[in-house]
Image (spheres, rainbow, N blue to C red):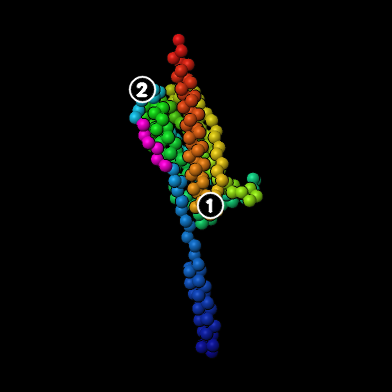
Amino acid sequence: MTNTRQHPLRAAFALIAALALSACGSARYPAYYTLHLEPSIHAPASERGIGSLTIKELQCPDYLCEGRIVYRPAPAEVGFYQHHRWAVSPRAMIAQYLAERVRARSLFVSVSGDESRVAADFALSGTLERLEEVDDARQVAAVCSIAAQLVDTRTGAVVWSRMATERVSVEQRDVAGVVDSLATAVRATVDRLVNDMEVELERRTASREVP
């Protein structure tokens, strides 16, 4: 009787162990990515710098900030690559690149990140509105959209604001190709914002110099 009862029990344990080993063997681990954003050449500070600047980390919607790379199979539908994630927060990577691009233009006497506790004359903040793959029929694109504004911290006045969007075709049809195209879209979007801010600051400076 004892042997008869133990045999099915041992068989059950053996089956459970086999299933557990099978599950472990097929486990899939996430792949992690960063945006490849070329570092800018830092130009020396010039006399035209209008003061010190702090660049704050970008804000972004929850679905863009939670770590997984995002795609849109339809305009009103959001999907996530479960096993493909950002190694670093995109808003932190983009804010760092934005700081590098501003420094390279010598628009301000000094440029610091959000971690600096030194009071600055101006603060540049923004929102990462979109950073995602967009599927449209047979075309796949990488889309980046950033809204930014420059505030005079001494008066609280908004000196400049703009939203820029860039759409880049994805030629390499895998997640690594999507990430490369997203990086291209980020670079173009940031450059467009910095160019526009530079034009506005030069216009304001020129208007003050007119007698």
Tell me what residue is drawn at x 44 percent, y 50 percent: 87
Could you tell me which residue is drawn at 54 percent across and 50 percent down? 171
- From this viewpoint, is residue 55 visible? yes
In front: mark 2 or mark 1? 1
Image height of 96 relative to 46, above or below: below
For image coordinates 54% across by 41% down, the residue present is 144
Residue at far top of view: 211
Point out residue 76 in the picture as x, y percentages from the top left corner: 65, 46
Q: Residue at x 47, y 41 (%)?
A: 91
Question: Badge 2 local density, few (<14 within 10 Å), some, or many (20+)?
Answer: few
Q: Earlier in the sequence, mark 2 or mark 1?
A: 2
Q: Which mark, residue 47? A: 2
- For label 1, the residue is 172
Instruction: Using the image as rendered, state which of residue 51 and residue 168 is in the foreground.
Output: 168
Q: Which residues are magenta?
A: 38-43
Q: Amino acid at mark 2?
A: Glu
Q: How many marks?
A: 2
Q: Nearer the viewer, residue 157 or 150?
A: 150
Residue 69 is situated, as x and y percent measured from the top left of the image, at 52, 50
Secondary structure of the magenta portion, mostly? Answer: loop
User: Could you say where residue 84 lies in the image, as x and y percent from the top left?
Assistant: 50, 54
Q: Is residue 103 above or below residue 141?
A: above
Asked whether residue 198 is drawn in magenta, I would say no
Q: Are marks 2 and 1 in contact (CB under 8 Å)?
A: no
Direction bottom: furthest residue: 1
- Residue 14 versus residue 6: which sits nearer the camera? 14
Compared across the picture, whether 92 is left or right of 79 comes to left
The percent position of residue 58, horizontal first and vertical second, equals: 48, 38
- Give the residue type that dot 1 points to: Gln
